[in-house]
Amino acid sequence: MKSAKSILIKNGYVLTLNRTRRIIADGAVHIEDGRIISVGNTEELRSTKAELILDAKHMIVMPGLIDTHVHLAQALIRGCADDVSLVDWLKSYVWVLQGNFTGDDGRVSAELCMAEMIRTGTTSFLECMIHTRYGFDNIAKSVEEAGMRAALSKIVMDSTGYADSDDIMYPGMIEDRDACLEETDRMHSKWHGKADGRLQVWYGLRSLGAVTPDLFKEVVRLSREKNTRMTMHLGEVVDDVRFVRDNFEMGLTEFAQEMGLLGPDMVFAHGIHLDDADLNRLAVTQSNISHCPASNMKLASGFARVPEMLGLGVPVSLGCDGGPSNNTYDMIRELRLAALIHKAKADDPLVVTAEQAIEMATLGGAKAMGIAETVGSLEPGKLADIILVDMNDLGLTPNVNPVSNLVYSGSGHAVDTVMVNGRLLMQDKKLLTLDEESVIQRARERNQALMERADVKITPKWPLE
């Protein structure tokens, strides 16, 4: 479908996420050439002329959700390693399957993941680690065609450990240091800033144990020379703490600071096993944490200290993580978990409110991705990355407070319309830039072939006849 140059969204419950967090009960948004021109009451914008008018009655109109920790390749292996311990999860299932990927697998998995993200209201995402075998080039092409906004991070590594476990990585997941750096440089030159500015190329540092201090420092230098960004897992497992303490006699963020990793251009995923000194360093340096509550709960990794982070001013965003660890890419479900688990952990129903969860998934995500000047809120001059969430549903009725209803009662299934740069990616719950039936069929075929090639057998724990 060809996008309209001018769009008027009217009659909606508009969450602006602007500086004052203005909400407009009967609101409208006027868009021209992909940018927001005005936001106001429907009556105020009644005379606005537009090629396309979207009636948002009984809908929330809000900024698109931003997922800051995504494994595109793991959509294809959803459900492959449920109810197992983390190291077994990696060694016996996830790494084995990903280590047998072909480029076709990588592209199909990316399209499956993006189709789900669009359908559930995500407009921007940070892919944390693209292996050479997944086919970076074709993944970037798929993102361009799907119309999403993305930061694609190429894996960089030069060792084969994981935290304090030596040489445990599956052979198919190992990459050469110089080849990693060369490919990142090449993909950055080719794709960074492309697709109407929607694409970024970052450095995706493997976890502690797989990157030496020399490579950490080299990536920091290269990243800042290119004016791009970095991401890595940090403190997801307590083994990270032991690894840094035993090998460098430092704490986690003390080591990260020594490597030059701290700063607004870094997104650390998880950040669970952090002490007070760690949180203070993150706050002072404005280093970003991508909070992944579903993954952390499923893998029993622990509880990130999000209430304390928010209190100190640490920038916190939200991430769904991957198909085997979540097992969805539905950010509205993630909102709910982010607003619930910390209440239970703190024995305090006042911590991490519905509003704070939405802020993490919009403004926090935009800050983490370095795009806060252009997306994350509905304000004149910003790009039209907007979703409409249909609240006219049994499970969302009565709707006395749409903000809390979205977080505590909603799911991505309620998303009706999605646009990026004013281009419709979904309308009336129909995907427009990806062929949903084809994506599903190809994903099923690729998954079956991958399981056979990797010789991984997944069966229910109950008897299967």
Image (cartoon, rainbow, N blue to C red):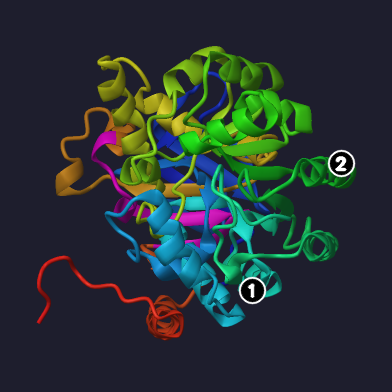
Q: Position of residue 56 (x, y in %)?
A: 38, 47
Look at the image and tell me whether residue 120 can be seen: no
Q: Position of residue 142 (x, y in %)?
A: 61, 71
Q: Quadrant of the N terminus?
A: bottom right
- Label tally: 2
Q: Position of residue 287 (x, y in %)?
A: 66, 28
Task: Assess disc 1: are there few (<14), some (14-19) or many (≥20) residues with their C-alpha within 10 Å of its C-alpha.
Answer: some
Task: Assess disc 2: are there few (<14), some (14-19) or many (≥20) residues with their C-alpha within 10 Å of its C-alpha.
Answer: some
Q: Secondary structure under badge 1?
A: helix
Residue found at the very far right of the displayed protein: 225
Q: Is residue 406 left or right of residue 463?
A: right
Q: In front here: 208 or 73?
A: 208
Q: Is residue 197 above or below residue 309?
A: below
Residue occupying image coordinates x 68% and y 69%: 132
Residue occupying image coordinates x 62% and y 56%: 129
Please say whether residue 421 is one of the residues in the magenta stretch: yes
Say what amino acid the circle numbered 2 marks.
Arg
Q: Quadrant of residue 429?
A: bottom left
Pointer 2 residue: 221
CA–CA distance in space, label 1 to label 2: 26 Å
Compare marks 1 and 2 and give the one earlier in the sequence.
1
What's the magenta region?
408-427
Say what amino acid the circle numbered 1 marks.
Arg
Residue occupying image coordinates x 62% and y 40%: 375
Q: Position of residue 81 (x, y in %)?
A: 34, 61
Q: Is residue 304 left or right of residue 268?
A: left
Look at the image and tell me whether residue 351 can be seen: yes
User: Can you tell which mark lies on residue 133?
Assistant: 1
Q: Is residue 24 above or below residue 323?
A: above
Q: In front here: 350 or 84?
A: 84
Residue occupying image coordinates x 70% and y 38%: 370
